[in-house]
Image (cartoon, helix red, strand yellow):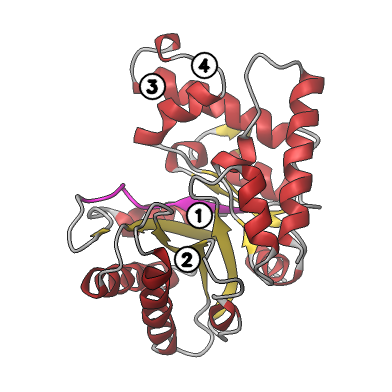
Amino acid sequence: MSTFDDQLEKVRTAAGFIAALDQSGGSTPKALQQYGIPKDAWSGDDEMFVLVHEMRTRIVTSPAFGGDRILGAILFEGTMDRDIKGVPSPEYLWKVKHVVPFLKIDKGLADAADGVQMMKPMPGLDLLLERAKAKGVFGTKERSVVKEANAKGVAAIVRQQFDVAKQVLAHGLVPIIEPEIDIKCPDKAAAEKLLRKEILAALDELAPGQLVMLKLTLPEEDDFYRPCIEHPNVLKVVALSGGYSRDEANARLARNHGMVASFSRALVEGLVAQQSAEEFNGALDRSIASIFAASMT
């Protein structure tokens, strides 16, 4: 089988969750501060991204991080283009750790309108997808956000997400569609009903064999996204932590059968630069163990 087929089989059948290591641009300073690196430790984006790559390298090279519990890892473009221990990051993930590499492709969020934040335009997306495919990336991830239960806005977000997903599919990659619902959404349950309806309609329009993944906010009603999980065009449904603490995110995830985690901040909660190797690896191991357990329900 090809590498892609091996990776597809792993995502489809293996136990584990997706590690989201894709903070970029605006979210990087906060991620570094939570990791114990203050803002005055760098000047300019270049130095900042060197520091965040060191953080990600420490996570990925840890003995706690491996394909026995982690299905895949989402990278941002700067990580994809850098090396880990002298090996290109996507290649290191797959060949050394047996973790499937994904790439964050969106360019951030547009201003809110109709109760949602659409994705900003993505000029050069086809070239980025070609580069990702050449580097051994399996799939992509794109994020937009629902702020209110607004039917017009939710429909627009899903339409944009699936338009981009079809562009990704045309390059032989598997898209992770992420229409996040803000956990502070004033009528979150109503927004979830609107979103599920639009997603299921869009999934029904895909051709047989066109596989996508969904990354969704943990719902108010347990097992709410079961129809999405069971849809023949869905490879996997993963959950974002969305601002919940790791304990809260794990508890909610465990009640949603068939969903697995794709946590970012909740994954690295408790990791700081000043920890010894033993402390860091132990903290990461406990984090991964708890998220893995919640993902196995």
Instruction: Name the residue type under label 3.
Output: Asp
**For the residues marked 1 and 3, what is the alpha-carbon distance in whole angstroms?**
25 Å
Q: Which residue type carries mark 1?
A: Ala
User: Pointer 3: what residue?
Assistant: 46
In primary-sequence order, the first of circles 2 and 3 is 3
Q: Earlier in the sequence, mark 1 or mark 4?
A: 4
Q: List the residue tagged with mark 4.
A: 37
Residue 209 lies left or right of residue 84; in this view the side is left
> Disc 2 residue type?
Pro
Q: Of helix, strand and loop, which one carries label 4?
A: loop
Query: Magenta segment range?
Result: 100-110
Pointers 1 and 3 in contact (C-beta within 8 Å): no
Q: Are marks 1 and 4 in contact (CB under 8 Å)?
A: no
What is the distance, in whole Å, between disc 1 and disc 2 at their CAs?
A: 16 Å
Residue wearing tag 1: 134
Q: For the view shown, which residue lies furthest in the top direction? A: 40
Q: Which label was assigned to residue 175?
A: 2
- The residue at the point 71 percent across, 60 percent down is 295
Looking at the image, residue 275 lies above or below residue 221: above
Horizontally, residue 22 falls left or right of residue 96, namely: left
